[in-house]
Amino acid sequence: MTPLSSPSTAVPQHRHARRAPVRHFRRDDDLSPTELVAVLDLADELKRDRFARRPLEGPRAVALIFDKPSTRTRVSFSVGVAELGGYPVVIDAQTSQLGRGEPIGDTARVLDRQCSAIVWRTSGHERLDAMAAASGVPVVNALTDLFHACQVLADLQTVRERHGRLAGVTLTYLGDGSNNMAHSYLLGGANAGMHVRICTPAGYLPHSDVLADARAVAATTGGSVTVTTDPAAGAEGADVLATDTWVSMGQEGESHARAHPFEPYALDEQALGLAAPGVVVLHCLPAHRGREISAAVLDGPSSAVWDEAENRLHAQKALLVHLLEQS
């Protein structure tokens, strides 16, 4: 008779005993220019056939954590995980132990043994970095105060649909140059070989480190990066005009104080008239008609805003497929 192994001497094995390299998407330049094109190509494929890829068949779970309110991010990731064959585990951080002060690394070590990826919408970017550092599965930035990388991935898909290319396209962002959309346009646009203009009041310039990184990327892709305080110069000849709310989440108390300096930077008919023929208008939503964008522009023929919102689904699915395959 073969003796049974003693429970006290058995060595448990789990999938983190030897970890393979894990790919995360914390900021736009976590994808190389070549990888960016591959992800956008796959996003187009998944837009044509939403069930063409099923890497989460099982279903395998993906944790979707929300520290901040969300409509488009929550819906697009939930639907996207399901269409990839998986199960979205939506977590309201304020009702979880993470919201009660559990260390981020401890949360990561729990989730990565049960989920195939972690998607997190949070505040400080350092929180996302801490999650990625501890996680054995891909961590995706669903928004931080510093970057909104998934949104710009969808924006790039939208621009490519409308203009047929990204390299050489001039994109002007009008508004708060210090916010997450401006930073992601800088990195994502430079990564795609675009000419990115950030048009913003002098007191709201992009973070200097992000600007330096974007310029370094642009030097390798043939793109360029410009920051200007002149709204007319920024809009002149632009192929894409983009904007965002002047009051980001957490800044609601500054709403009245912030409105005045941004008024000359509104994306309105005057700005549209300065742009190139066939200009494409983007806004990540929610929009405030009559403030950062006029109703006539948002709802007019140049607007690609609703395609842009839909493309969150396709671009994020492609991103998840890429990260899962690379990890």
Image (spheres, grey):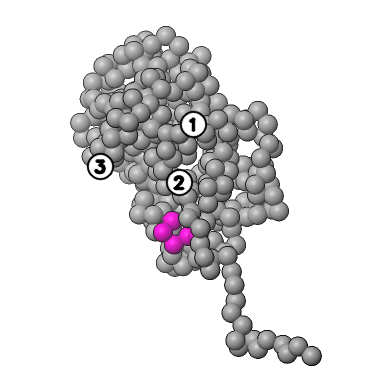
Please tell me whether mark 3 sits on a helix, a strand or a loop: helix
Magenta span of residues: 132-136
Residue 45 position by quadrant: top right
Q: Which residue is mark 3?
A: 209
Q: What is the CA distance from the residue labelled 3 to the residue labelled 1?
A: 25 Å
Residue 120 spot, x, y in % from top left: 48, 51
Q: Main secondary structure of the magenta part?
A: helix
Q: What amino acid is at disc 2?
A: Phe
Badge 2 density bin: few <14, some 14–19, many ≥20, Cα 10 Å: many
User: Considering depth in this image, is 118 or 232 the residue closer to the camera?
Assistant: 118
User: Residue at point 71% right, 53% down?
Assistant: 58
Residue 213 in view of the camera: yes
Residue drawn at x 23%, y 39% as measured from the top left: 208
Numbered tag placed on residue 291 in the rendering: none
- Give the class, few, some or many, for how many residues have Cα within 10 Å of label 3's Cα (few <14, many ≥20): few
The residue lying toward the viewer, choosing from 204 and 169, is 169
